[in-house]
Image (spheres, coloured by chain):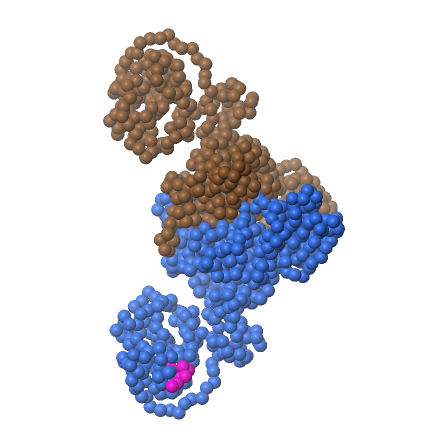
Chain colours: A brown, B blue
Amino acid sequence: MLLSTLVSLRTKEFPADAQLISHKLMLRAGYIKGVSNGIFTMATPAILSARKIENIIREEMNAVGGQEVSFPVVMPKELWEESGRYNSIGDELVRLSDRQGRGLVLGMTHEEAAVQLFRDWVSSYQQLPAMIYQIQTKFRDEARARGGLIRVREFVMKDAYSFHATTSDLKKYYKKVYDAYNRIFTRIGLKNFVAVGSDTGMMGGSVAHEFMLLTPSGEDTIVICNKCGYKANMEVAVSSEEKFDRDTVAPIEKVFTGNLGEIKEICDFMHIDANKTCKAVCYNIKGSNQILVCFIRGDLEVNEAKVKHALKRDIGPVSVSDNSVLVAGNIGPIGLDKKNVVLLFDNSLKGRNGLVAGANEAEYHIKNLDFDRDMPHAKFNDIAKVKEGARCPVCGETLSLSGGIEIGNIFQLGTKYSKAMNCFITDKSGKQINPIMGCYGIGVGRALASVIEESNDEKGMILPMSIAPWQVYLAALRIDDPTVKKAANALYKKLLKAGIEVLFDDTEATAGVKFSSCDLMGIPLRVVISPKTLAKEEIEVQSRDGSLKDNYPIKDAALKLRKIINSKK
Amino acid sequence: MLLSTLVSLRTKEFPADAQLISHKLMLRAGYIKGVSNGIFTMATPAILSARKIENIIREEMNAVGGQEVSFPVVMPKELWEESGRYNSIGDELVRLSDRQGRGLVLGMTHEEAAVQLFRDWVSSYQQLPAMIYQIQTKFRDEARARGGLIRVREFVMKDAYSFHATTSDLKKYYKKVYDAYNRIFTRIGLKNFVAVGSDTGMMGGSVAHEFMLLTPSGEDTIVICNKCGYKANMEVAVSSEEKFDRDTVAPIEKVFTGNLGEIKEICDFMHIDANKTCKAVCYNIKGSNQILVCFIRGDLEVNEAKVKHALKRDIGPVSVSDNSVLVAGNIGPIGLDKKNVVLLFDNSLKGRNGLVAGANEAEYHIKNLDFDRDMPHAKFNDIAKVKEGARCPVCGETLSLSGGIEIGNIFQLGTKYSKAMNCFITDKSGKQINPIMGCYGIGVGRALASVIEESNDEKGMILPMSIAPWQVYLAALRIDDPTVKKAANALYKKLLKAGIEVLFDDTEATAGVKFSSCDLMGIPLRVVISPKTLAKEEIEVQSRDGSLKDNYPIKDAALKLRKIINSKK
């Protein structure tokens, strides 16, 4: 392609709200253009990269027996009512009407459409396992779209749905997709990524993994054990139970604490550590008038995903001060057995004593709380967030935390959708059963942004050969010199003929501008042709990743470049 | 791919409302599945074909310098307000709101998004011509979606937008795309198609062509001169002015016609031909309280597209009986010079006399109407539909009519969008001008359906090698015989290794069922392996189009099939 006519612009400017490096670079290099909040046009460099990512995904999905299909972006609401998601999903599901007033939704995933296709066309276990996948536009009305292509509202996603007659078959297949995902992310050039256990959230099901790019800029938090390899998303990372010595038993005492309510204030006032306190954290239980009070050791934080699991209900924020049952700032476990109040206790409190907690009375706390003695019927759950430095639940080694960007996810869905949508097959024994499902997603644009987020330097992107929009940036210097112009044009045509993907900078810009453009756009190989190189009948070749810088005879250019490209694929 | 696990179903059944053969066959062969009115899931056979069509389109667009991009499906209403289309387009544009209540639209074409990208990034004539295109999902809320993939609400379309500094450059480029379109339709296997002049409709602009597949089932009507090659869509086909002899001049006479109003009733009653009458056809002029009365010779029909052009306003249906100014059934040209009534006269009336027309009085017509004498100030336009057997406006030969399915369209848009959206470039003389645009569309699913509509027989589809989902249908007969099973599996693997696309029917169905499936799905080559062929160490190869039936040694299978496939590409 000729740079002179490429509808594109490279600039040093970017919107002030672009915080991720991938977002800044994609704007500056003319890869994307914002159309609305979380909605982008993919310009030619981005779409050429995206198509390569799509093809890598396609190859790996086909290799595990995937069958490509295409579900509609716009679906009737009735289909989503069948699964129950029309009502259970909030505002991120866009609901609209057609000209007849019939309700429609914009697809954010396609479990319903997949089950609809499957249930009419497949009837026997003999046809399984089967996996259908699509690479299709989705819309999710994110409340906080940000970070360029990392968290958008409209996006292209590969979503796949597998169907099985037995759970063991699902588990076997799940592992195949898990391996395919590792191959995909490696092939597109990601380096520091891991698969972690994750919450199944609104998708339903039991087992799930997220593939995470480990990067400080990621908004997810990943818990990692460097000794045994335990890895989990913060949402599901298991807290290990700690060994501790009980304090000397002492009777409960009431302490005047005035308007002090925060754990830090109480600790300063009473000269104790936060791990000697019992903290209360309150939520509203959605769809009810009940208040949930979670008790947890004062040095820990509540993990809301774990709370939802323990409760099997959804929760939301609540203002305790509006509630007459609870005394804000002084909530404690003793005597809280009230109507419309549900209690949850974190494992971190189990068997502890000598704790400070709220007295359920304005301006007072208690000390010497002893869970064994004072709360003998309390039921404990793991509802705490794992802290940096906590112990690995598997091997006991110190855990570390990392930021992460989710680059893919896989779910063992089970029969949630097939059951709700009355999808049946005949199993081996002739019985009618709901097929057991898995689902598997990768966002194409986010994959591209993630590669850029990980591979860049102060000059711009550093794209791998496998997904770069062009393999070669041909910079003709002093193209106003007819000799250069002629030689550069001839070389361009020769390279194209050899099947090499070339962005030919045929503009009259300076060498500095041309090199900056090449670096910013992250093109793997820069080929320079100039009066100087022509005097020696050579071209100069330099790789963006710094691994190569050499001159070659111009007559061998196509062959040399082809070899370099193949070695980097 | 193995047929046993393909999520697909072949059946003799189809919904009663499937009238087009392509619709019936795609349903019966498991290519598509209806999800809602005009919304389909493309199953694996359809999407494999569609991807091949997309690649052919992509190659031809790239060959004329096209740059692939991807615009969003969902756009902010403000972008569409800039062009004016947010208000000018009716219910086929889907309007919706996001969670913040901000207005959005679902893209039905992408002129606005293209201009938005271009105006920020391109500033000089030196960067032109430039053409950007995408292959992307669109949604158009058709009032009457029907015909399977021929007229849908959601569809994937290649839409392209070119930008030019001069009209002559646009015209030159338009011709290049015109030629590319001919190559695309030929490559995907369409045979009987033509490019015809067409109406620019809501797209704006002056010159436009539609590529039409000529088929009796098409809902468009194409006017064709088999002598000089004149071709046009009925909407714009020019009526030639006919030679005629004037009648003897006679004074106007009023005739009592009672409740007779239809032209046929009047002709029967007065013993005259319809071409001796002057018919009135009424419309509402949209956005006004004016009534339009079109006068045309009684044997002709009004062409509403031409009326809109002549009037430069949009029109809609009107009920004359609700209107006190006009006398329904008795409307005539004389004395109709009334407030809020606009008159249009068709060329077919120019200079005519001896005509019967309405008297503008209940129960009366007039005879001996003479346009030269009685309506000396009437202005005439071509607002008639061309009839079968009319004269060619170019050479005078008899015209014929054909049904047509629109398979693509190209428009010379001019500056309609660039002007409305304040898009400027610097021209050669340094002046700021609005770039001149062209736009070019092809629906991918409709292209596939059109090929099937044209190429089929009583057994099913007949797909060309270039777009068939698989090149070979490998039918293993008596696969319960271990020898067959082993040989068929080995052959399947060998063909895959040779890069041949094979659908392997590994089911235990009968030969009859297997052959029917292959025929129905339209796979170009059927390869049979059976105890009988194995006894001779052969395979049997038969082409779906009937051009080939032969046996080959099984050991040469891959090479032979590769040769046959290459010869048919």
Above-or-below relation of B369 to A513? below
Residue B517 forms part of the magenta stretch: no
Position of residue B490 measured from the top left corner of the image (x, y, whole percent): 69, 44
Q: Which of the 4 image quadrants contains residue A371?
A: top left
- Is residue A546 shown left or right of residue A166? right
Quarter placement of the C terminus of chain A: top right
Above-or-below relation of B159 to A80? below
> Depth check: A551 or A91 in front?
A91
Q: Residue at x 70, y 43 (%)?
A: B483
Decide if residue A470 is in sight here.
no
Position of residue A169 measured from the top left corner of the image (x, y, whole percent): 55, 35
- Magenta span of residues: B271-278
Position of residue B51 measured from the top left corner of the image (x, y, whole percent): 57, 51
Position of residue B383 measured from the top left corner of the image (x, y, whole percent): 42, 74
Q: Residue at x 46, y 48 (%)?
A: A73
Above-or-below relation of B328 to A540? below
Decide if residue A383 is in sight here.
yes
> Depth check: B444 or B526 in front?
B526
Q: Residue at x 41, y 20 (%)?
A: A347
Q: Residue at x 28, y 19 (%)?
A: A335
